[in-house]
């Protein structure tokens, strides 16, 4: 129940107020410094580096012994490159020149094709492509052995007397073109230019001098070969933005995107494709991509480098115009051959195979054997086209087969493609990997990859508006993918890109080196990201805000929220949700007021808007639920709550308008995606005000009373009012609410007929809804079960008796019962708070911090551990639990919605008490075979799992004697992520999260 929603201070950016209740203490911890580790030679003592690339700061503002002066005394070292180097390397050097000027105001000379001269110069280039670099290697001035012949690797090193007339050089050498580009951009990031300087207006720290610390720094090769993003679902936000700012989704826009991808050490792009044709809309698109050094691809259903729009535009030119290989083989082959002839000189990964036109099944409801045979024929013909147009040795042409929806079924039923083709496994569109390579599949020369989603259009509901992707879940799923050998391609659907800035960077940085970003350092990554963007002073708090808004959105995506999502009457659930949102919004607004003006646009985009707008939508739905409940209870405040909902609806609109106005309207349209008013999987055309209830309020004094745990109201309800039971171990307190049913104020009195009842108030004047907390004096209550009556009286009117029940034990007390649980109600336990954690068979349960709904999740490491049959070789978690009464006991395991990623393996765990045999439960028992449906996968409860972003696995056990018992959770399969345990007898009140967890006594 929520009696009132208190106003807090107005945001300086917005005259409308954001209204939430006071909040409890945060359970989120501050984070500490961390860096992504790379190979490092001649290690320089680490410092607080702004870069998320190298794990040490190599740039200083003061000179040290042997350091290289990049800028000093208003003079910058010349940037020298060989004119024969790759165009992308020469262009990136121009970016470094501009970045140095952004930081210092000094524009160094960029000398291409000239002999180096001067006291200090920067020499950058590609091994084997730059005569300058090759000459330094040949004369022994630099050692290129650590990167020679490797993919996308680089060295940054300081060299004394590298060439005649040059006293010192900073040398940036790449093993290939992107290796050199990454090395150049590492210097940009180190001097203080964020990769998001353009895409999020990240502020640039001004410095007068820049020195590079002496040493040699090596990074690469990346763990995942191709690392990229997919711009998708780009209407109604990204598309209108690009058309207004650039005249279209064209090469002018893509130039900024290509640069960003490279600054984040990505290399791969699937371009926007909703009614877009990358190669035809702007013929410069592929040329500019290749010059930058971006590997292009097409989405999972657009084969042979041709966009779906191209077929719609040209299909009459190709055979009978049908997108059906069975009836238009020649036409489709000609269409594909023309595409490959057009793009054959560019670096690309060619999507092969075929789906139906418009990302639909190839033959809806057709015979799968016939479809498989046809698909094999399609792939064979496509490879003939590749051999003819690109390379006679087709195994040298990078190809990918996306195992998406029904195509995954073909593979499941035995269809195969040649070994040199990369198998692109897909998640379920909701961030849960469906399948990962088996031991045999890991031997394929083409390897495997993952197509992942931060954004999706489809069932059970589209989610396109805001970041709902907590980093710990991304880490868990993608680290598992890497451990199972999916390391050739990682591509993520980022929707409009904004506001997915943080998860996008995390995804690409993780792909560079997953082993260097263990679970213990996820929070540190976020803190370092915040420090890079906004400096160290507020970095810990900013990291906390962005982590928590994504976590809260991950509880249930905003598009899925409804008035009754969070319980209003049980466990103070809705109130606790609002409290969490209130805390981070207040913190964000406080920081916003302290930041310098030049940082506030970026802060609004990256921190304040996503936190505050998400909080507004969450509160709007909760307030709608309150309005509807209050109307049912005939509360006068129902109408006030309706007014509040309308205010929140307007505030959501105002926040979007603010976003669209910042930096001169640079990001106009970017937050145009609707998020309120969904009634099906598809997004509404406009945000829709929820249905509200308003009531007629009599002109009189009339009292209403409600109690925690019930939606009923008294007087007027036939059944008696009862509060939930309290017990002497948990020592709960419960709420009574008193409110006006008429327009006039009144006074009330609250009395108890037993001395052990404690009331937070015994009288008062009701001008607005009032709350009384009912507790128990445990020194006064008798041992056993006790009942009392609290009576709420309006002196000149109504009187409502309320039953209060308490249970006290002298055998089981807080002091002598070292166990979880109490004498009444369910017991909820955070999985990580196990009494014992026992390893076995080379495997262990270990914590993923901040995973899921609560503070953490527990899963099995190594992630590739073999399945076991407990108790043999099965690691287990043990919990001491007080069971106050003998009988049947239910155990609910709240887990992440992970899927069965290996053929023939379930998602199983075992549960037992004491010495009873483990009872195995499988999340997939009775769920169907998981074959692709119209909104994959066809698993009976999958829709519930992904909407809740959690799954409940249940078991029942018989306990013959009351007392403290040992609850054991055994590993059966890896991949289960255990968040919370609920032990109960069927007395769990309805709510979204279930009862709050308690600590062991």
Image (cartoon, rainbow, N blue to C red):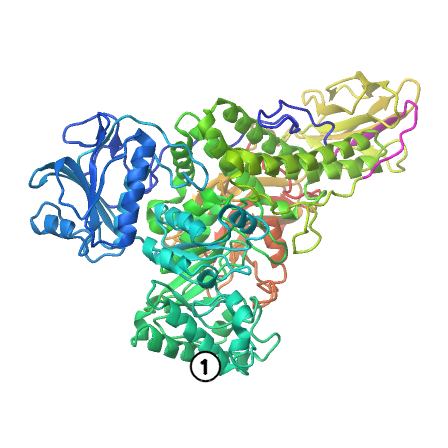
Against 187, is 478 above or below? below
Against 532, is 680 above or below? below
Q: Position of residue 491 (x, y in %)?
A: 43, 56
Front residue of this view, candidates 906 and 757: 906
Q: Which quadrant of the figure contains the N terminus?
A: top right
Left or right of 749 in this view: 600: left
Residue at left offset 79%, top offset 17%: 762
User: Is residue 88 in sight in this rendering?
Assistant: yes
Q: Which quadrant of the figure contains the C terminus?
A: top right
Residue 559 is covered by the magenta coloring: no
Q: How many marks?
A: 1
Left or right of 572 in this view: 44: left
Front residue of this view, candidates 755 and 295: 295
Circle 1 sits on which residue?
377
Q: Position of residue 183 (x, y in %)?
A: 26, 45
The dominant secondary structure in magenta is: loop
> What is the crowding at mark 1: few (fewer than 14 residues within 10 Å), some, or many (at least 20)?
some
Q: Which residues are magenta?
A: 693-708
Front residue of this view, candidates 846 and 826: 846
Assign a secondary structure to mark 1.
helix
Residue at left offset 50%, top offset 59%: 427
Residue at left offset 64%, top offset 29%: 18
Against 1000, is 92 above or below? below
Q: Position of residue 466 (x, y in %)?
A: 56, 44
Q: Position of residue 648 (x, y in %)?
A: 69, 34
Image quadrant in which you'd find residue 672: top right
Front residue of this view, candidates 312 and 64: 312
Left or right of 802 in this view: 425: left
């Amino acid at each position: 129940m929520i009696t009132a929603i208190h106003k807090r201070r107005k945001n300086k950016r917005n005259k409308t107020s954001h209204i939430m209740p006071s909040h409890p203490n945060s359970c989120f911890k501050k984070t500490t410094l961390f860096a992504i580790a790379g190979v490092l030679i001649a290690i320089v003592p680490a410092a607080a580096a702004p870069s998320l690339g190298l794990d040490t700061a190599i740039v200083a503002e003061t000179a040290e012994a042997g350091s290289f002066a990049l800028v000093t005394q208003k003079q910058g070292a010349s940037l020298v490159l060989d004119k024969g180097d790759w165009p992308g390397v020469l262009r990136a050097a121009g970016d470094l020149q501009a970045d140095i000027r952004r930081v210092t105001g000094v524009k160094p000379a960029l000398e291409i094709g000239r002999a180096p001269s001067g006291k200090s110069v920067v020499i950058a280039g590609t091994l084997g492509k730059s005569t300058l670099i090759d000459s330094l290697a040949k004369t022994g001035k630099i050692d290129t052995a650590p990167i020679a012949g490797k993919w996308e690797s680089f060295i940054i090193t300081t060299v004394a007397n590298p060439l005649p007339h040059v006293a010192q050089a900073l040398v940036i050498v790449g093993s290939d073109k992107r290796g050199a580009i990454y090395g150049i951009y590492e210097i940009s990031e180190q001097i203080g230019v964020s990769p998001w300087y353009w895409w999020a207006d990240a502020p640039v720290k001004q410095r007068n001098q820049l020195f590079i610390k002496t040493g040699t720094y090596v990074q690469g090769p990346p763990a995942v070969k191709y690392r990229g993003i997919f711009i998708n679902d780009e209407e109604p936000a990204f598309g209108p933005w690009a058309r207004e700012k650039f005249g279209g989704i064209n090469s002018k826009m893509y130039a900024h995107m290509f640069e960003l991808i490279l600054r984040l050490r990505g290399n791969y792009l699937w371009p926007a494709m909703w009614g877009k044709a990358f190669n035809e809309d702007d013929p410069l698109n592929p040329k500019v991509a290749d010059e930058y050094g971006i590997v292009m691809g097409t989405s999972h259903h657009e084969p042979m480098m041709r966009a779906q729009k191209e077929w719609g535009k040209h299909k009459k030119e190709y055979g009978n115009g049908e997108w059906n290989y069975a009836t238009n083989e020649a036409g489709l082959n000609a269409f594909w051959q023309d595409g490959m002839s057009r793009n054959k000189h560019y670096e690309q990964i060619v999507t092969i195979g075929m789906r139906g036109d418009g990302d639909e099944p190839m033959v809806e409801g057709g015979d799968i054997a016939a479809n498989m045979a046809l698909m094999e024929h399609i792939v064979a013909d496509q490879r003939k086209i590749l051999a003819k147009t690109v390379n006679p040795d087709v195994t040298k042409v990078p190809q990918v087969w996306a195992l998406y929806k029904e195509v995954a079924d073909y593979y499941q039923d035995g269809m195969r493609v040649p070994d040199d083709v990369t198998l692109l496994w897909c998640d379920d569109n909701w961030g849960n990997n469906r399948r990962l390579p088996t031991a045999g599949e890991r031997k394929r020369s083409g390897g495997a990859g993952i197509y992942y989603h931060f954004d999706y259009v489809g069932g059970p509901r589209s989610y396109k508006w805001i970041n709902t992707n907590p980093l710990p879940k991304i880490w868990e799923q993608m680290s598992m993918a890497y451990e199972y050998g999916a390391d050739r391609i990682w591509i993520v659907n980022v929707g409009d890109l904004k506001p997915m800035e943080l998860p996008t960077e995390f995804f690409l940085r993780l792909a560079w080196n997953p082993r260097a970003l263990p679970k213990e350092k996820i929070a540190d990554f976020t803190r370092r990201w915040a420090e890079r963007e906004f400096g160290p002073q507020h970095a810990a708090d900013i990291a906390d805000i962005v982590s928590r808004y994504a976590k809260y959105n991950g509880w249930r995506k905003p598009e899925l929220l409804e008035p009754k999502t969070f319980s209003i009457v049980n466990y103070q659930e809705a109130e606790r949700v609002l409290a969490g949102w209130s805390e981070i919004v207040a913190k964000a607004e406080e920081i916003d007021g302290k930041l310098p003006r030049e940082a506030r646009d970026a802060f609004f985009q990256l921190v304040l808007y996503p936190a505050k707008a998400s909080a507004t939508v969450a509160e709007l739905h909760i307030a709608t639920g309150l309005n509807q409940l209050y109307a049912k209870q005939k509360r006068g405040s129902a109408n006030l709550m309706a007014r509040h909902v309308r205010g929140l609806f307007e505030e959501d609109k105002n926040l979007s308008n603010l976003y669209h106005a910042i930096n001169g309207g640079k990001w106009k349209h970017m937050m145009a995606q609707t998020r309120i008013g969904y009634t099906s999987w598809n997004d509404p055309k406009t945000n829709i005000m929820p249905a509200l209830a308003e009531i007629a309020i009599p002109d009189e004094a009339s009292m209403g009373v409600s109690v925690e745990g019930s939606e009923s109201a008294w007087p007027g309800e036939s059944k008696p009012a009862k509060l939930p039971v309290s017990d002497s171990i948990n020592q709960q307190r419960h709420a009574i609410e008193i409110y006006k049913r008429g327009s006039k104020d009144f006074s009330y009195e609250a009395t108890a007929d037993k001395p052990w009842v404690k009331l937070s108030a015994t009288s008062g004047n009701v001008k607005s809804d009032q709350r009384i907390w009912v507790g128990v004096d445990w020194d006064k209550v008798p041992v056993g079960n006790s009942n009392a009556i609290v009576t709420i009286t309006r002196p000149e009117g109504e009187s409502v008796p309320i039953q209060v029940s308490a249970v006290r034990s002298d055998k089981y007390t807080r002091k002598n019962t070292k166990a979880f649980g109490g004498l009444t109600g369910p017991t909820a336990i955070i999985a990580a708070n196990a009494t014992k954690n026992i390893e076995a068979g080379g495997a262990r349960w270990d914590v993923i911090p901040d995973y899921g709904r609560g503070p953490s999740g527990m899963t099995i490491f190594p992630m590739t551990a073999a399945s076991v049959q407990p108790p043999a070789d099965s690691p287990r978690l043990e919990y001491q639990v007080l069971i106050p009464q003998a009988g049947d006991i239910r155990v609910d395991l709240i887990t992440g919605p992970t899927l069965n990623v290996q053929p023939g393996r379930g998602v199983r765990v075992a549960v037992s008490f004491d010495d009873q045999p483990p009872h195995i439960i499988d999340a997939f028992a009775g769920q169907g075979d998981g074959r692709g449906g119209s909104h994959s996968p066809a698993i009976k409860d999958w829709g519930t799992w992904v909407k809740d972003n959690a799954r409940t696995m249940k078991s029942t056990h018989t306990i013959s004697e009351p007392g403290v018992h040992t609850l054991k959770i055994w590993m059966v399969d890896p991949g289960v992520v255990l968040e919370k345990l609920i032990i109960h007898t069927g007395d769990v009140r309805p709510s979204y999260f279930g009862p709050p967890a308690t600590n062991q006594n």
